[in-house]
Image (tube, rainbow, N blue to C red):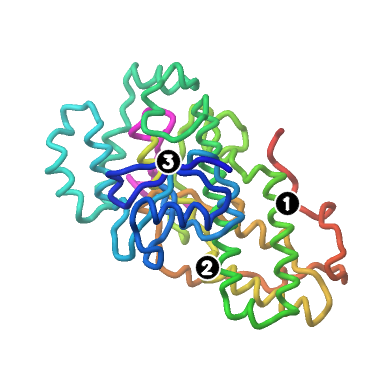
Amino acid sequence: MKGYKITNCAQDIRYGIAGNSLKDVFTKGCQKLKLDHLNVTMMVLDGTVIDDEDYFQQLPAQTLFIFRLNGETFETGADLIYNVLAAVNNNTLKTSIKIKSFMDENIKEKIRILSSVLDVDDESNKKKNISSLRLKDPDWFQGLETRARTKEEFMFKRCQERIRSYMYKTKSDMIKSEFYIKHAKCRKYLDEVFKQFSELLTKNKYHGYYFDRSNTNGLCNEIGTFKCEGAWNQSSCSYERGTGHKINPYQNRECRIIFSTWNLDHWVERSRTVIPALFEASKMASEVHRSINMNYFYELLFTTVNLKLVHIVCHDKGQHSTAKCDPNLYLQYKKVIHSFSYVDNCLVNDFNN
């Protein structure tokens, strides 16, 4: 049994509870907060909904869970920026209440402006940026529910959380779908491929190194600066005449918070395109007695083959109409059902242990 922290959507009260399952923690949390369980959604701070037991079991002790009543607003963009501005020690960022009101409209553009304001290159920030240890830059870790001893360790875990959420959201969407419920033969193929996903993600440590500046395969340079890769239908970020959005979350607490608004965007969309393609692949596999090409779908869901790191301004949530899956890659050539080993054919593990 592990201990956790719970709070309401307003985050004005907080309790500690213990539980050994999602149902246990959810029930106790609703009772403690005096909320009707029929109208409550349980989530973590980044907004990921916790409705899957496997995902819940992966979360560490002392994770903070938000219990949100239907209809409540949780951590809007304006609230996020308000919290940042209230903590910034800068003469140009005074009167936080007025700024919060100002931020309520056109949030993307204002985050862009704030990001540039926070991109300060003075000697103090340079020294803090170089520091990795929590003991050397305690302000960077302020407000975090983490046992990480270094910035790199924290950023590694944050990236793992994002990739892990893609796994569990995809699995949850699949299991709840009408297709999965109705097609028993296809279900076996889908269950098998998700088992393989889990094994390979564990082997690759959920690609946490994407955010780790100490790893040569990360998405940032050696000092921790990340560059926006542009909207899904662009080859690069066109901001500031091609200079592009950039940020170094290792620099200070404010930049770390702003970086949480950046997104790992699926070029070929996860929910609109990849999941339906997986269903079609399972149907094809059951008809010709071949296995789903796990590698192809793994790359689309969890790797930078299909993920682009983008600033909030460049994150287009509209339909990616021209980004499609390739049906020719849905299946493996080998005609084997559920008894094959995928190890020899899996992705090369690009994480250096």
Residue 87 percent across, percent down from the top left: 25, 31
- Name the residue beneath numbered marker 3: 16
Residue 246 percent across, percent down from the top left: 40, 39
Apparent side of residue 352 relative to residue 157 in the rendered image (left or right): right
Q: In the rendered structure, does residue 206 fall within the stretch colored magenta?
A: no
Vertical order, 217 against 336 (above or below): above
Among the 4 quarters of the image, the one containing residue 170: bottom right
Apparent side of residue 186 relative to residue 142 in the rendered image (left or right): right
- Name the residue beneath numbered marker 1: 199
Residue at (49% x, 52% y) in the render: 25
- Name the residue beneath numbered marker 2: 271
Residue 89 percent across, percent down from the top left: 23, 26
Span of residues in magenta: 235-255
- Amino acid type of the residue that numbered disc 2 sits on in the rendered structure: Ser
Query: Crowding at label 2, few (<14), some or many (≥20) Cα neighbours within 10 Å?
Result: some
Numbered circles on residues, count: 3
